[in-house]
Amino acid sequence: MKPAELERLLALADEVQDLERRLARAEVLAAELARDQDVVAAAPRVRAAMERAAAALEPIARELEREWVDQGPLVAAWQRAAELEQVAEAAGADPVPSAEEAEAARLNVETARLATRRQRELIDREREAMAGTLAGAPLAVELPPGGDDARPEAARREVLALIGAAAEAAHEAEEAGSAAARQAAEARAELERLGDAADLRRALEAARERLPAEVTLDPSAPASAAVRLARAGVRVR
């Protein structure tokens, strides 16, 4: 093989390697761009849903605080009646009156807590809506688990935790959307420099077709020539 022919062949081999590198990078960028675009598209929806959830949970928290205050005397009366029943039993007195009073006080508390159960239904509904929004969004936010404690103070703690999670998710969505938008812009700019992946693939296929499957190099050929050809997929003898 003449030196001029070898140089043309090496230039073509280098072109194939360059196209392979550019295509591989373009495909990685295209995948990253798709993910970033998903985040950019999801961010406003997630933020709006979390802000709506927080707004819906605020009055529930206030209502539970009111119920907590209102049920305080009822719970205290139940505890006193239960203690009097224990005292009567310990003293050998008839515990029936105290037991009846304790049962009546317990029923009063249970009746009052029916309202708290209704608030729990509202909490669960908001938690499910938040979980549904986050399940379809490319964001890593975990919601605090629910519970079944009938006390309004326990339900209020859960509501406050959900409100905090909603604020965190809204903030993260905004931050993630902004970061993804920047990354997407950078990816588009680099893709413009590299070229479209489909165009690069066609150019690579055309260049590979011009390469021979196998060549025999003269002993005088530089050692680097065999390496460059082999990297382009040419068998060297």
Image: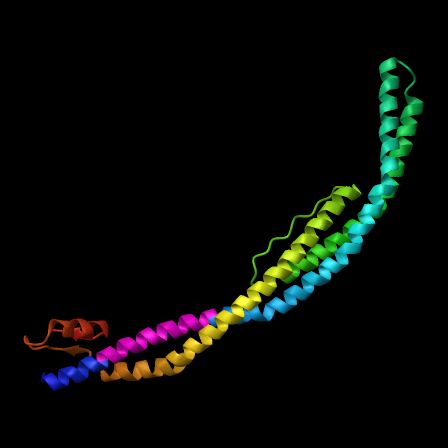
Quarter of the image where the C terminus is located? bottom left
Q: Is residue 36 in view?
A: yes
The furthest residue to the right: 97
211 w.r.t. 124: above or below? below
How many numbered marks does the figure carry? 0
Quarter of the image where the N terminus is located? bottom left
* Image side of residue 218 versus residue 72, left or right: left
> What kind of colouring is applied to the model shown?
rainbow
Residue 22: percent from left, percent from top: 34, 75
Which residue is at a point 68% across and 49% down the rendered structure image? Answer: 161
Displayed quadrant of residue 176: bottom right
236 w.r.t. 90: above or below? below
Front in this rendered view, residue 94 or 151:
151
Displayed quadrant of residue 19: bottom left
* Image side of residue 48 versus residue 216, left or right: right
Q: Give the range drawn in magenta.
A: 13-32
The furthest residue to the top: 92
* Magenta span dominant secondary structure: helix
Which residue is at a point 21% across and 81% down the rendered structure image? Answer: 11
Displayed quadrant of residue 57: bottom right
Which residue is at a point 85% across and 35% down the rendered structure image? Answer: 75
* Image side of residue 38 versus residue 233, left or right: right
Which residue is at a point 18% across and 82% down the rendered structure image? Answer: 9
Residue 124: percent from left, percent from top: 73, 53
Residue 28: percent from left, percent from top: 41, 70
